[in-house]
């Protein structure tokens, strides 16, 4: 059974407590709180990488990995 830490959710800023589904797609492409992280990794976001499959199938796996870690760091996960 997976346990959620509700203290993390309850301490989020109001703009994060939206009706958006906080799944992987949202984190990588849509979450406004992660826009600065996406800008740091701009080369990962071309017109060819607009799906989850194309994003994770990129040549530079280490940059993709670092991007995901930096996203998680924003939320202290």
Image (spheres, rainbow, N blue to C red):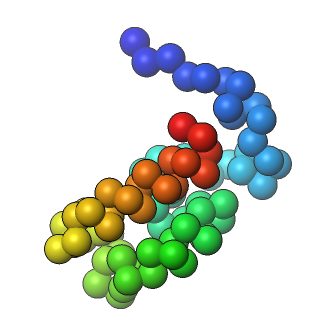
Number of marks:
0
Whether 26 is drawn above or below 77: the answer is below
Image location of residue 33, percent across then percent down: 66, 60
Let me know if residue 21 appears in the view.
Answer: no
Quadrant of res 35: bottom right
* Residue beneath the point at 55% across and 48% down: 73
Let me know if residue 42 appears in the view.
Answer: yes
Quarter holding the N terminus? top left
Q: Is residue 74 left or right of residue 71?
A: right
Q: Is residue 27 left or right of residue 11?
A: left
Quadrant of res 53: bottom left
Q: Is residue 26 left or right of residue 5?
A: left
Quarter holding the C terminus? top right
Whether 23 is drawn above or below 31: the answer is above
Considering every residue shown, the one lying at the far top of the view is 1
* Residue beneath the point at 61% across and 71% down: 36
**Front position in the image: 72 or 16:** 72
Image location of residue 62, percent across then percent down: 26, 63
Considering every residue shown, the one lying at the far bottom of the view is 47
* Residue beneath the point at 59% across and 63% down: 34
**Front position in the image: 35 or 1:** 35
Considering every residue shown, the one lying at the far right of the view is 14
Image location of residue 67, percent across then percent down: 42, 62
Image location of residue 64, percent across then percent down: 32, 64
Whether 62 is drawn above or below 8: the answer is below
């Amino acid at each position: 059974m997976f346990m959620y830490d509700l203290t993390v959710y309850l301490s989020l800023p109001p703009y994060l407590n939206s009706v958006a589904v906080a799944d992987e797609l949202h984190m990588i492409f849509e979450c406004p709180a992660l826009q600065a992280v996406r800008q740091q990794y701009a080369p990962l976001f071309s017109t060819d990488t607009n799906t989850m499959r194309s994003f994770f199938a990129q040549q530079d796996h280490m940059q993709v990995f670092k991007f995901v870690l930096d996203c998680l760091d924003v939320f202290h996960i």
